[in-house]
Amino acid sequence: NFMDNEYRKHLAGKVILITGGTGSFGNTVIDKLLSFDPKRVIIFSRDEKKQEDMRNHYASQILRFVIGDVRDKESVDQMVKGVDYIFHAAALKQVPACEFFPLEAVKTNIVGAANVIHAALKYRVKRLVILSTDKAVYPINAMGMSKALMEKLMTASSRNILDANEKETMLCGVRYGNVLYSRGSVLPYFVSLIHKDEPLRLTHPDMTRFLLSLRDAVELVLYALIHGKNGYMYVRKAPACTVKTLAKALCEIFDHKKGYMEVGVRAGEKVHETLVSSEELLRAEDLQTYFAIPAESQGLDYNKYLLAPKKRTHSKIPRSYTSENTERLNVAETKKLLLALPEIQKELGHILSK
Protein backbone atom coordinates (compact mmCIF):
# COMPACT_ATOMS: atom_id res chain seq x y z
CA ASN A 1 0.00 0.00 0.00
CA PHE A 2 1.46 3.32 -1.13
CA MET A 3 0.08 5.27 1.85
CA ASP A 4 1.43 2.74 4.32
CA ASN A 5 4.92 3.02 2.86
CA GLU A 6 4.70 6.77 3.21
CA TYR A 7 3.62 6.48 6.84
CA ARG A 8 6.39 3.96 7.56
CA LYS A 9 8.96 6.41 6.21
CA HIS A 10 7.81 8.99 8.76
CA LEU A 11 7.06 6.74 11.73
CA ALA A 12 9.79 4.07 11.70
CA GLY A 13 12.08 4.44 14.72
CA LYS A 14 9.96 7.22 16.22
CA VAL A 15 8.43 7.59 19.69
CA ILE A 16 4.66 8.08 19.48
CA LEU A 17 2.41 9.11 22.37
CA ILE A 18 -1.34 8.52 22.40
CA THR A 19 -3.21 10.30 25.18
CA GLY A 20 -6.41 8.47 26.05
CA GLY A 21 -4.85 5.58 24.18
CA THR A 22 -7.04 2.88 25.73
CA GLY A 23 -10.10 4.25 23.91
CA SER A 24 -11.59 3.21 20.57
CA PHE A 25 -9.12 5.29 18.57
CA GLY A 26 -6.07 3.92 20.41
CA ASN A 27 -7.25 0.34 20.03
CA THR A 28 -7.77 0.78 16.30
CA VAL A 29 -4.64 2.76 15.46
CA ILE A 30 -2.19 0.53 17.35
CA ASP A 31 -2.14 -2.41 14.93
CA LYS A 32 -1.43 0.03 12.13
CA LEU A 33 1.25 1.90 14.07
CA LEU A 34 3.04 -1.29 15.10
CA SER A 35 3.29 -2.29 11.43
CA PHE A 36 5.33 0.89 10.79
CA ASP A 37 8.16 -0.19 13.14
CA PRO A 38 8.13 2.71 15.60
CA LYS A 39 10.69 2.75 18.39
CA ARG A 40 8.01 3.03 21.03
CA VAL A 41 4.27 3.70 21.36
CA ILE A 42 3.24 5.18 24.71
CA ILE A 43 -0.33 4.66 25.86
CA PHE A 44 -1.15 7.37 28.38
CA SER A 45 -4.46 7.04 30.22
CA ARG A 46 -5.95 6.74 33.67
CA ASP A 47 -7.74 3.38 33.64
CA GLU A 48 -5.44 0.59 34.81
CA LYS A 49 -7.95 -2.14 33.95
CA LYS A 50 -8.19 -1.05 30.30
CA GLN A 51 -4.41 -0.77 30.14
CA GLU A 52 -4.02 -4.29 31.54
CA ASP A 53 -6.48 -5.68 28.96
CA MET A 54 -4.62 -3.91 26.18
CA ARG A 55 -1.23 -5.04 27.41
CA ASN A 56 -2.41 -8.66 27.40
CA HIS A 57 -4.07 -8.33 24.02
CA TYR A 58 -1.06 -6.89 22.20
CA ALA A 59 1.78 -8.44 24.22
CA SER A 60 4.23 -6.15 22.40
CA GLN A 61 7.62 -4.95 23.61
CA ILE A 62 7.12 -1.70 21.70
CA LEU A 63 4.05 -0.63 23.70
CA ARG A 64 4.59 1.22 26.93
CA PHE A 65 1.68 1.84 29.29
CA VAL A 66 1.69 4.89 31.53
CA ILE A 67 -0.97 5.75 34.10
CA GLY A 68 -1.59 9.46 34.19
CA ASP A 69 -4.16 12.17 33.60
CA VAL A 70 -4.00 14.94 30.99
CA ARG A 71 -5.44 17.27 33.64
CA ASP A 72 -2.27 16.87 35.67
CA LYS A 73 0.44 19.04 34.18
CA GLU A 74 3.27 17.15 35.85
CA SER A 75 2.24 13.71 34.65
CA VAL A 76 1.86 15.08 31.09
CA ASP A 77 5.19 16.87 31.30
CA GLN A 78 7.11 13.77 32.35
CA MET A 79 5.54 11.82 29.54
CA VAL A 80 6.16 14.15 26.60
CA LYS A 81 9.92 14.45 26.99
CA GLY A 82 11.61 12.60 24.12
CA VAL A 83 8.39 12.06 22.14
CA ASP A 84 8.34 12.68 18.36
CA TYR A 85 4.61 12.55 17.60
CA ILE A 86 1.48 12.93 19.71
CA PHE A 87 -2.12 11.91 19.04
CA HIS A 88 -4.24 13.74 21.60
CA ALA A 89 -7.32 11.53 21.97
CA ALA A 90 -8.00 11.83 25.72
CA ALA A 91 -11.46 13.30 26.22
CA LEU A 92 -14.79 13.07 27.93
CA LYS A 93 -17.03 12.41 24.98
CA GLN A 94 -20.42 11.24 26.23
CA VAL A 95 -22.85 14.09 25.57
CA PRO A 96 -25.19 13.57 28.58
CA ALA A 97 -22.26 12.99 30.99
CA CYS A 98 -20.73 16.32 29.94
CA GLU A 99 -24.13 18.05 30.22
CA PHE A 100 -24.46 16.99 33.85
CA PHE A 101 -20.79 17.55 34.76
CA PRO A 102 -19.69 20.40 32.50
CA LEU A 103 -16.74 21.38 34.68
CA GLU A 104 -15.32 17.89 34.20
CA ALA A 105 -15.53 18.43 30.42
CA VAL A 106 -13.69 21.73 30.87
CA LYS A 107 -10.93 20.10 32.91
CA THR A 108 -10.33 17.16 30.56
CA ASN A 109 -11.18 18.56 27.14
CA ILE A 110 -9.83 22.10 27.53
CA VAL A 111 -7.29 22.21 30.37
CA GLY A 112 -6.07 18.70 29.48
CA ALA A 113 -5.50 19.72 25.85
CA ALA A 114 -3.72 22.90 27.00
CA ASN A 115 -1.35 20.80 29.13
CA VAL A 116 -0.55 18.50 26.20
CA ILE A 117 -0.01 21.42 23.77
CA HIS A 118 2.15 23.26 26.30
CA ALA A 119 4.35 20.20 26.88
CA ALA A 120 4.60 19.52 23.12
CA LEU A 121 5.95 23.03 22.53
CA LYS A 122 8.24 22.89 25.55
CA TYR A 123 9.89 19.64 24.46
CA ARG A 124 9.81 20.44 20.72
CA VAL A 125 7.64 17.50 19.73
CA LYS A 126 7.66 17.29 15.93
CA ARG A 127 3.94 16.90 15.34
CA LEU A 128 0.78 16.94 17.44
CA VAL A 129 -2.68 16.08 16.15
CA ILE A 130 -5.69 16.83 18.34
CA LEU A 131 -8.87 14.80 17.82
CA SER A 132 -12.08 16.81 17.70
CA THR A 133 -15.69 16.16 16.80
CA ASP A 134 -18.56 17.41 14.65
CA LYS A 135 -20.16 18.47 17.94
CA ALA A 136 -17.60 21.29 18.18
CA VAL A 137 -19.18 23.11 15.21
CA TYR A 138 -22.06 25.41 16.22
CA PRO A 139 -21.91 23.64 19.60
CA ILE A 140 -25.03 23.38 21.74
CA ASN A 141 -23.75 20.90 24.34
CA ALA A 142 -20.95 21.08 26.91
CA MET A 143 -19.03 18.30 25.16
CA GLY A 144 -19.04 20.22 21.86
CA MET A 145 -18.31 23.56 23.54
CA SER A 146 -15.30 22.16 25.37
CA LYS A 147 -13.99 20.54 22.16
CA ALA A 148 -14.53 23.81 20.26
CA LEU A 149 -12.34 25.58 22.81
CA MET A 150 -9.75 22.83 22.48
CA GLU A 151 -9.65 23.58 18.74
CA LYS A 152 -9.21 27.29 19.50
CA LEU A 153 -6.31 26.51 21.85
CA MET A 154 -4.59 24.53 19.13
CA THR A 155 -5.14 27.28 16.54
CA ALA A 156 -3.93 30.05 18.84
CA SER A 157 -0.83 28.06 19.82
CA SER A 158 -0.05 27.32 16.18
CA ARG A 159 -0.29 31.03 15.41
CA ASN A 160 2.31 31.73 18.11
CA ILE A 161 4.60 29.17 16.50
CA LEU A 162 4.25 30.83 13.11
CA ASP A 163 4.71 34.32 14.60
CA ALA A 164 7.81 33.27 16.53
CA ASN A 165 9.04 31.51 13.40
CA GLU A 166 9.87 28.38 15.39
CA LYS A 167 9.22 25.65 12.90
CA GLU A 168 10.06 22.67 15.15
CA THR A 169 6.50 21.81 16.12
CA MET A 170 3.46 21.37 13.91
CA LEU A 171 0.03 21.49 15.57
CA CYS A 172 -3.11 20.54 13.69
CA GLY A 173 -6.42 18.85 14.33
CA VAL A 174 -8.99 16.52 12.85
CA ARG A 175 -12.72 16.50 13.23
CA TYR A 176 -14.95 13.53 12.58
CA GLY A 177 -18.49 12.52 13.34
CA ASN A 178 -19.89 9.42 14.97
CA VAL A 179 -17.51 6.54 14.56
CA LEU A 180 -19.37 3.31 13.91
CA TYR A 181 -19.05 0.84 16.77
CA SER A 182 -16.78 3.04 18.87
CA ARG A 183 -17.03 2.42 22.58
CA GLY A 184 -20.13 3.94 24.19
CA SER A 185 -21.76 4.69 20.83
CA VAL A 186 -25.20 3.65 19.62
CA LEU A 187 -24.35 0.51 17.60
CA PRO A 188 -22.96 -1.61 20.47
CA TYR A 189 -25.95 -0.42 22.52
CA PHE A 190 -28.42 -1.47 19.80
CA VAL A 191 -26.70 -4.85 19.43
CA SER A 192 -26.92 -5.42 23.20
CA LEU A 193 -30.69 -4.77 22.99
CA ILE A 194 -30.97 -7.25 20.12
CA HIS A 195 -29.23 -9.87 22.29
CA LYS A 196 -31.78 -9.20 25.04
CA ASP A 197 -34.56 -9.42 22.43
CA GLU A 198 -35.82 -5.95 23.30
CA PRO A 199 -36.97 -3.23 20.89
CA LEU A 200 -34.22 -0.77 19.87
CA ARG A 201 -34.56 2.55 21.67
CA LEU A 202 -34.45 5.52 19.28
CA THR A 203 -34.09 9.12 20.34
CA HIS A 204 -35.86 10.65 17.31
CA PRO A 205 -36.40 8.89 13.97
CA ASP A 206 -35.47 11.92 11.83
CA MET A 207 -32.24 12.71 13.65
CA THR A 208 -29.27 12.37 11.29
CA ARG A 209 -25.66 11.43 12.01
CA PHE A 210 -22.49 11.16 9.94
CA LEU A 211 -21.29 7.57 9.57
CA LEU A 212 -17.59 6.86 9.63
CA SER A 213 -15.79 3.57 10.19
CA LEU A 214 -12.97 3.51 12.74
CA ARG A 215 -10.63 2.61 9.89
CA ASP A 216 -11.53 5.80 8.00
CA ALA A 217 -11.12 7.85 11.17
CA VAL A 218 -7.64 6.41 11.65
CA GLU A 219 -6.77 7.17 7.99
CA LEU A 220 -7.79 10.80 8.54
CA VAL A 221 -5.67 11.13 11.67
CA LEU A 222 -2.60 9.58 10.00
CA TYR A 223 -3.11 11.83 6.98
CA ALA A 224 -3.14 14.88 9.28
CA LEU A 225 -0.05 13.65 11.13
CA ILE A 226 2.02 13.36 7.94
CA HIS A 227 0.55 16.08 5.71
CA GLY A 228 -0.85 18.45 8.32
CA LYS A 229 0.00 22.14 8.26
CA ASN A 230 0.18 24.37 11.32
CA GLY A 231 -3.20 25.53 12.61
CA TYR A 232 -5.24 23.52 10.12
CA MET A 233 -8.26 21.36 10.89
CA TYR A 234 -8.84 18.33 8.67
CA VAL A 235 -12.28 16.86 8.11
CA ARG A 236 -13.18 13.67 6.29
CA LYS A 237 -16.27 13.80 4.11
CA ALA A 238 -18.73 11.13 5.14
CA PRO A 239 -22.24 9.94 4.34
CA ALA A 240 -25.03 10.13 6.90
CA CYS A 241 -28.32 8.45 7.68
CA THR A 242 -31.28 8.95 9.98
CA VAL A 243 -31.43 7.10 13.29
CA LYS A 244 -34.53 5.31 11.98
CA THR A 245 -32.61 4.07 8.91
CA LEU A 246 -29.81 2.82 11.15
CA ALA A 247 -32.28 0.94 13.36
CA LYS A 248 -34.12 -0.58 10.38
CA ALA A 249 -30.82 -1.71 8.81
CA LEU A 250 -29.77 -3.42 12.05
CA CYS A 251 -33.16 -5.08 12.49
CA GLU A 252 -32.86 -6.52 8.96
CA ILE A 253 -29.25 -7.68 9.44
CA PHE A 254 -30.04 -9.52 12.70
CA ASP A 255 -33.60 -10.45 11.73
CA HIS A 256 -34.74 -8.65 14.87
CA LYS A 257 -38.52 -8.99 15.17
CA LYS A 258 -39.05 -6.57 18.08
CA GLY A 259 -38.31 -3.52 15.91
CA TYR A 260 -37.77 -0.18 17.60
CA MET A 261 -39.48 2.35 19.85
CA GLU A 262 -39.02 6.08 20.32
CA VAL A 263 -37.75 7.31 23.70
CA GLY A 264 -37.06 11.01 23.07
CA VAL A 265 -33.98 13.17 22.61
CA ARG A 266 -31.29 12.98 25.32
CA ALA A 267 -29.87 15.99 27.15
CA GLY A 268 -27.79 18.20 24.87
CA GLU A 269 -28.32 16.26 21.64
CA LYS A 270 -28.53 17.93 18.25
CA VAL A 271 -31.00 16.91 15.58
CA HIS A 272 -28.32 17.21 12.86
CA GLU A 273 -24.54 17.47 13.20
CA THR A 274 -22.25 19.88 11.35
CA LEU A 275 -18.71 18.94 10.31
CA VAL A 276 -17.73 22.23 8.65
CA SER A 277 -19.39 25.59 9.31
CA SER A 278 -20.33 27.86 6.41
CA GLU A 279 -17.79 30.39 7.75
CA GLU A 280 -15.07 27.75 7.53
CA LEU A 281 -16.16 26.60 4.07
CA LEU A 282 -15.44 30.10 2.76
CA ARG A 283 -11.74 29.49 3.37
CA ALA A 284 -11.56 25.66 3.29
CA GLU A 285 -9.58 23.75 0.69
CA ASP A 286 -11.46 20.85 -0.91
CA LEU A 287 -9.11 17.84 -1.13
CA GLN A 288 -11.65 15.35 -2.59
CA THR A 289 -11.77 12.99 0.41
CA TYR A 290 -11.05 15.72 2.95
CA PHE A 291 -11.63 19.37 3.72
CA ALA A 292 -8.55 21.23 4.95
CA ILE A 293 -9.53 24.27 7.00
CA PRO A 294 -6.79 26.85 7.58
CA ALA A 295 -6.86 29.07 10.65
CA GLU A 296 -8.35 32.50 10.10
CA SER A 297 -5.56 34.70 8.83
CA GLN A 298 -5.98 37.97 10.74
CA GLY A 299 -3.20 38.45 13.28
CA LEU A 300 -3.56 40.06 16.68
CA ASP A 301 -3.28 43.55 15.25
CA TYR A 302 -7.00 44.18 14.67
CA ASN A 303 -6.50 47.85 13.80
CA LYS A 304 -4.45 46.99 10.78
CA TYR A 305 -7.41 45.02 9.51
CA LEU A 306 -9.87 47.85 10.11
CA LEU A 307 -7.69 50.66 8.76
CA ALA A 308 -6.69 48.97 5.54
CA PRO A 309 -9.58 46.74 4.60
CA LYS A 310 -8.83 44.51 1.64
CA LYS A 311 -11.23 44.75 -1.27
CA ARG A 312 -12.98 41.42 -1.31
CA THR A 313 -14.81 39.84 -4.16
CA HIS A 314 -18.00 38.39 -2.78
CA SER A 315 -18.13 34.68 -3.14
CA LYS A 316 -21.48 33.06 -2.51
CA ILE A 317 -21.70 31.99 1.14
CA PRO A 318 -21.78 28.20 1.17
CA ARG A 319 -24.16 26.16 3.30
CA SER A 320 -22.45 24.44 6.20
CA TYR A 321 -21.56 20.79 5.64
CA THR A 322 -24.02 18.83 7.78
CA SER A 323 -25.39 15.34 8.31
CA GLU A 324 -28.64 16.68 6.85
CA ASN A 325 -27.21 17.83 3.52
CA THR A 326 -24.39 15.33 2.95
CA GLU A 327 -24.95 12.13 0.96
CA ARG A 328 -27.86 10.35 2.68
CA LEU A 329 -27.84 6.56 2.84
CA ASN A 330 -31.02 4.48 2.57
CA VAL A 331 -31.62 1.23 4.47
CA ALA A 332 -29.93 -1.00 1.84
CA GLU A 333 -26.84 1.25 1.65
CA THR A 334 -26.64 1.50 5.44
CA LYS A 335 -26.87 -2.29 5.68
CA LYS A 336 -23.98 -2.64 3.26
CA LEU A 337 -21.89 -0.22 5.33
CA LEU A 338 -22.72 -2.01 8.59
CA LEU A 339 -22.03 -5.48 7.16
CA ALA A 340 -18.51 -4.33 6.28
CA LEU A 341 -17.76 -3.64 9.96
CA PRO A 342 -15.67 -6.39 11.60
CA GLU A 343 -17.68 -6.05 14.84
CA ILE A 344 -20.98 -6.72 13.06
CA GLN A 345 -19.46 -9.70 11.21
CA LYS A 346 -18.27 -11.06 14.55
CA GLU A 347 -21.73 -10.63 16.13
CA LEU A 348 -23.35 -12.38 13.16
CA GLY A 349 -20.79 -15.19 13.49
CA HIS A 350 -21.74 -15.67 17.16
CA ILE A 351 -25.43 -15.80 16.32
CA LEU A 352 -24.93 -18.25 13.42
CA SER A 353 -22.74 -20.55 15.51
CA LYS A 354 -25.40 -20.83 18.23
Image (cartoon, grey):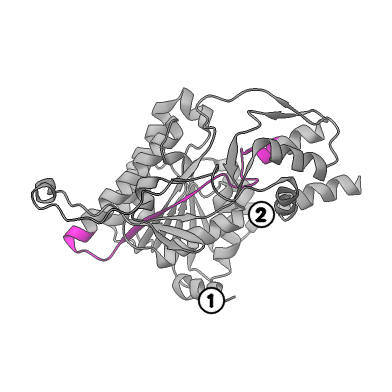
Q: Nearer the viewer, mark 2 or mark 1?
A: 1
Q: Which residues are magenta?
A: 162-189
The structure residue drawn at horizontal position 43% and vertical position 31%, both measured from the top left corner, is 140
Measured as percent of width and height from the top left, residue 240 is found at 60, 46
Q: Amino acid at mark 2?
A: His
329 vs 296, nearest the viewer: 329
Measured as percent of width and height from the top left, residue 14 is found at 44, 68
The structure residue drawn at horizontal position 61% and vertical position 45%, both measured from the top left corner, is 182
Identify the disc placed on residue 34.
none
Identify the disc placed on residue 57.
2
Task: Answer left or right for 233 relative to 241.
Answer: left
Q: Eyeballing the image, is 144 above or below 13?
A: above
Q: Amino acid at mark 1?
A: Asn
- Figure quadrant of residue 186: top right
- The residue under label 1 is 5
* Residue 183 belongs to magenta span: yes
Locate the C terminus and report the quarter of the image it occupies: top right
270 vs 219, nearest the viewer: 270
Q: Upstream in the sequence, badge 2 or badge 1?
A: 1
